Amino acid sequence: SAVISQKPSRDICQRGTSLTIQCQVDSQVTMMFWYRQQPGQSLTLIATANQGSEATYESGFVIDKFPISRPNLTFSTLTVSNMSPEDSSIYLCSAPRTSGRHGPPHSLADTQYFGPGTRLTVL
Amino acid sequence: AQSVTQLDSQVPVFEEAPVELRCNYSSSVSVYLFWYVQYPNQGLQLLLKYLSGSTLVESINGFEAEFNKSQTSFHLRKPSVHISDTAEYFCAVTPAGFQKLVFGTGTRLLVSP
């Protein structure tokens, strides 16, 4: 299974500010994904982070609100901009199956592993 | 597009009783199916998955799920639950060969003594 870490694990932020969440994977992956889990709800995909190109956003999510960076094959950031209380959620990153071996980074994988999540509270 | 339905939002059971958590999916193409578990205040963990081959898949902690293509279902079962199985269980689907997951709304399994 993949080892995926996220920072910060939780934060409490003021309305109108921005927070950048970091996600680190223990081996190279072509695509990384960012999900949101609102209180008491399921996970919703925000965007797919591709290395070397712009992120692909799902319906209802825009780059101005959730800018994403993907500087290399093991790291990505998600920024929640101009936050409001409605942004209070758990934000999770995920990456396709990786066992830590040095495999081809562009091969299709079949299982998503998730980071521990970032619990965001906006006051 | 794919969709997942988990009809039961909450399933209360007594310890050592059997349990079934239902999952139905909708897709016009071949799919991969997953069950993820989220323990209280923890992240999402993969429980088991169906990609191809045998329609019955098992996890290391006694859960199993059976892929039924005709009924478009992937129900999760365990013959005898423990208190430690108390968690939220999510069913998810992705088109075969792709990686974007569509999640169901989750089922909270509550195991009591």
Image (spheres, coloured by chain):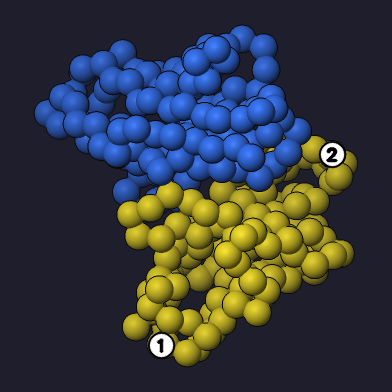
Where is residue B10 drawn, in percent x and y? 25, 37
Residue located at (33% from left, 54% from top) = A40
Q: Colour of chain B?
A: blue
Q: What number of labels is visible?
A: 2
Q: Colour of chain A?
A: yellow
Q: Which residue is mark 2?
A: A107
Q: Which of these two is toward me, A39 or B60?
A: A39
Residue located at (47% from left, 90% from top) = A16
Q: Which residue is mark 1?
A: A14
Pinpoint the chain carrying mark 2: A
Pinpoint the chain carrying mark 1: A
Give the answer, above or below, for where A63 lies relative to B90: below
Q: Which of these two is toward me, A22 or A58?
A: A58
**Quarter of the image holding residue B100?**
top right
> In the rendered structure, which amino acid carries the disc numbered 2?
Ser
- Left or right: B39 in relation to A79: left
**Quarter of the image holding residue B16?**
top left
Which quarter shows the N terminus of chain B? top right
